Image (cartoon, rainbow, N blue to C red):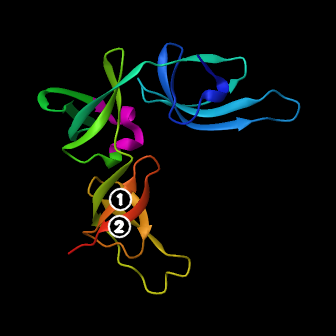
Amino acid sequence: MLSYNELKIGTIFELDGQPYEVLSYEFLRMQQRKPVAKTKIKNLVTGQVLDRNFHQNETFSEAEVDKQEVTYLYNHRGEYWFCEKGNPKNRFSLTEEQLGSAAQFLKANTDVTALKWEEKILNIKPAIKVDLEVTEAPPAERGNTAQGGNKLVTLETGAKVTTPMFINTGDIVRVNTETGQYVERVEKAK
């Protein structure tokens, strides 16, 4: 059993018979009140994200979630298609709502981890850092570097990421899929 103060980021637990993942966690102790765990949790079945406070008298059971390696194939009209690794005939799809922000960093034919609960695939976890090509980058403006200078670029998956000014179209950049932030340039365009 988990207590309210064990609901750290990434913890998967059961609430009302459904598996939830903790996206953010903050411990609050207000004056003369009992401590509270302020969380943002995601229902892994529906993809719905909730803000929820938990009190010290609440306990939860850990969700029995299995992990399986799968391959991302393609997306079509809001459905993202996957197959078992090494078995392209066994396919399944998840909606954009179920995947959440992870969907914008999925590149065709890449391996990801699927989360299974009660033999049903609920969601996927991409690698924490992925390398993607920049498809659109505005030119760097002279004199716009006093504060470090950033610009918004578009990646090959359609995701938009803020990068330093020296990033150009064709560069390969590394992005953190959990935060959606630029990490580093991996390869300069030829």
Instruction: Work out whether residue 167 can be spotted.
Output: yes
Q: Quadrant of residue 185?
A: bottom left
State the residue lying farthest toward the left.
Answer: 89
User: What kind of element bears circle 1?
Assistant: strand
Mark 1 or 2 closer to N-term? 1
The residue under the point 30% across, 54% down is 158
Magenta stretch encompasses residue 56: no
Q: In the figure, 186 relative to 94: above or below?
A: below
Q: In the figure, 51 relative to 137: above or below?
A: above
The residue under the point 58% across, 17% down is 60
| Residue occupied by mark 2 | 185
Amino acid type indicated by mark 2: Arg
Q: Give the range drawn in magenta.
A: 94-103
State the residue lying farthest toward the bottom.
Answer: 143
Magenta stretch encompasses residue 98: yes
The residue under the point 58% across, 16% down is 1
Residue 164 on image: x %, y %: 43, 71
Amino acid type indicated by mark 1: Arg
Magenta-drawn stretch, dominant element (helix, strand or loop): helix
Instruction: Work out whether residue 78 can be spotted.
Output: no
Tags 1 and 2 touching, CB below 8 Å: yes
Residue 114 on image: x %, y %: 31, 30
| Residue occupied by mark 1 | 174
Q: In the figure, 175 relative to 165: above or below?
A: above
Left or right, 133 with reference to 29 = left
Q: Which quadrant would the C terminus be assigned to in this image?
A: bottom left
Report how far apart the C-alphas of labels 1 and 2 lie in the structure.
6 Å
